[in-house]
Image (spheres, helix red, strand yellow):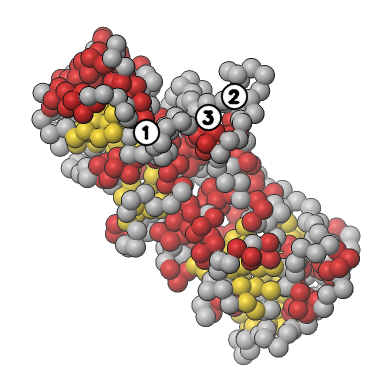
Amino acid sequence: MMNSELRISLVGMPSTGKTTFLAAFWNLIQEPTVEACVRLRCLPRAAVYLHEIHQAWLHGQEVGHTSRDSGELILLDIDLGGREVVLEVPDLSGESFEDMFVHRRVTQEVDVILTAADGLLLFLHPHELRPRITLVDAIRMGIQPEVPGDQDELLALDLKKLPAEVQAVDLLQTITSRRLWARAELSSPRIGVIVSAWDLVEAEGLPPARWLAARMPLLNQYLAASLPTESVRIYGLSARGGSADASELATFDPATRAFLVDSAGVRTGDISTPLQWIATGA
Amino acid sequence: MSGLEVSALASSGDLRGRHPIGDGAEPLSLSPCSALTVDEATALLSCRSALVVLPIGYVGTGKTTLLAGLYERLCLGPLGERCFAGSLSLLGFEERCFEASLGSGNSRARQDRTSRDAKRLFLHLTVQTVGAGLGSRRDLLMADISGEHLKELVTADEPGPLSFLLARTDVLALLVDGEGLADPLRRYSTITEARTALRAMIERSSVRDTARVVALVTKWDYCVGVADMSNIVSRLQAELESVVPDVRLMTCAARPDAGSELEEGTGTAEFLEATLEGTIRDPARLLSFGRADAPLALVPGGLVLEAFLSAGHPVP
């Protein structure tokens, strides 16, 4: 059996759920459920970071980023649908992506990781959408604009506060152009769009693809127009397993806590589905 | 595990589990993604076709508002049959939208005229027909220049940047202040000024015969309900046609008054369509000369690479 490498980059601004996904994924591959076709082949020698985030996840706590510098490069020997794979999942810090967007710079190591990736998982958090509200919108909605003391004094544009979809489009444009610059190839990587904390928006009754179209129309247009249809899939993910408080979440069976909803709205406990799709296209 | 142990693992090649990322090397700079300079726009035109659009009007006619309103409307979903397919100046658009956003500290929508980098003139936008393939993509380079330049062209024959812009423009959009048309005291001066401005641009610059000329009555929300407005618009049209016979007249209210019944972005879809009817008859003609050799590559049908736009160089 061939031992191949699969490099998948988790992309997203701070607090969009990348590390929580990684913790839940680490739980899954150690204790695969019946429906999951991924398992850990052997324990890595150095697993301090994974252990730390997994412990936080098991106890229902916020899975904070514990990295120094730009993030953590994680290599795992896994069995993916009967195929032996060395999975490289860099857990790049959200600050790395914020730095790309706000300060227009990228560390060389992060650049190499992003340009070499076989696929990307773009993380978005539904509580961090920051939709644009124009003054006309605000006044028509009865919202009184907050004006500083001096009416001629404009506040400075804070790029961190721009709509999340604008940030996401910029990140994808930047990564796409850097990849082309570095690899000089025209093929598009597979991009899985992960709407994290899906349990918070599930009640809206929209499958992930329609939810994205309704809530992030600029990003949705960009994905539809700029990438081949077969290169993009949109998922809803609840890696934490719900919005219950930590003490309650800790009592849930870890094997069934996290769940994923695919583009069509089908729910599964196998949160590795996006990785399998990137690996195989199926 | 100590940092020393991690380093030892890394150097031994066994990175299974974890390896802190961060090599301490100089970071790479990325494209600013703001409006493009003349050189950057020229580099873009040297490798791909893009319609050069010049919205032009006197100070306060709403040039920047039109461009920001077009983008804001596109952010809500496809505009007519056109959808957003990328922008090399995404943050340039955002800068222009900010002043009319709730978070700006403004109490009313207004457009700042002085704070932006005057060298960054061009907003880039790629649109694609909804449901169609990459072949339907069109790139637009829309100039955002001060109305002062038009005044100087008309009154002193000093075109400034208009000299090269008008020579390369594929679509010339003359903006006429709808607030002025609605005001009986300013109505005829507004019409006369518009005609004179169009004439000055045609006579005092090298606007190409193939350039499409449209006239856009902005702030249309001021005109709604004004008595005899259809005759006023007809008069405007006749005056402009005396200079350019096939000028097309449209109306828009990119940011109507909050009390108006008009939607934000009213007329921007029509403006975009009229713009896309322009044809690039002379794609080899650049905005500035001597910069066509910048190395550029393309994403299929999409973005110009950052090669020219500063990427790949260590941050100073």
Where B121 falls versus B179 (above or below)?
A: below
Find the distance from the CA under tag 1 to the CA under tag 3: 17 Å
At label 2, the amino acid type is Leu
Residue at image coords 51%, 23%: B115
Where A230 falls versus A200 (above or below)?
A: below
Subunit bearing disc 3: B
- Residue B158, image x, y percentages: 27, 13
At label 3, counting other C-alpha atoms closer than 10 Å, the crowd grade (few under 14, some 14-19, many 20 or more) is many
Mark 2 lies on residue = A154
Mark 1 lies on residue = B253
- The answer to whether residue A207 is left or right of residue B285 is right
- Residue A35, image x, y percentages: 67, 86
- Residue B224, image x, y percentages: 32, 30
Find the distance from the CA under tag 3 to the CA under tag 2: 8 Å
* Viewer-side residue, B248 vs B96: B248
* Viewer-side residue, B20 vs B251: B251
Q: Nearer the viewer, mark 1 or mark 2?
A: 1
Mark 3 lies on residue = B99
Which of the 4 image quarters holds residue B234? top left
- The answer to whether residue A275 is left or right of residue B287 is right
Find the distance from the CA under tag 1 to the CA under tag 2: 24 Å
Same chain, labels 1 and 2? no
At label 3, the amino acid type is Glu
Q: Are marks 3 and 2 in contact (CB under 8 Å)?
A: yes
Q: Residue furthest top?
A: B156
Examine the rendering and report whether any part of residue B153 can be seen. no
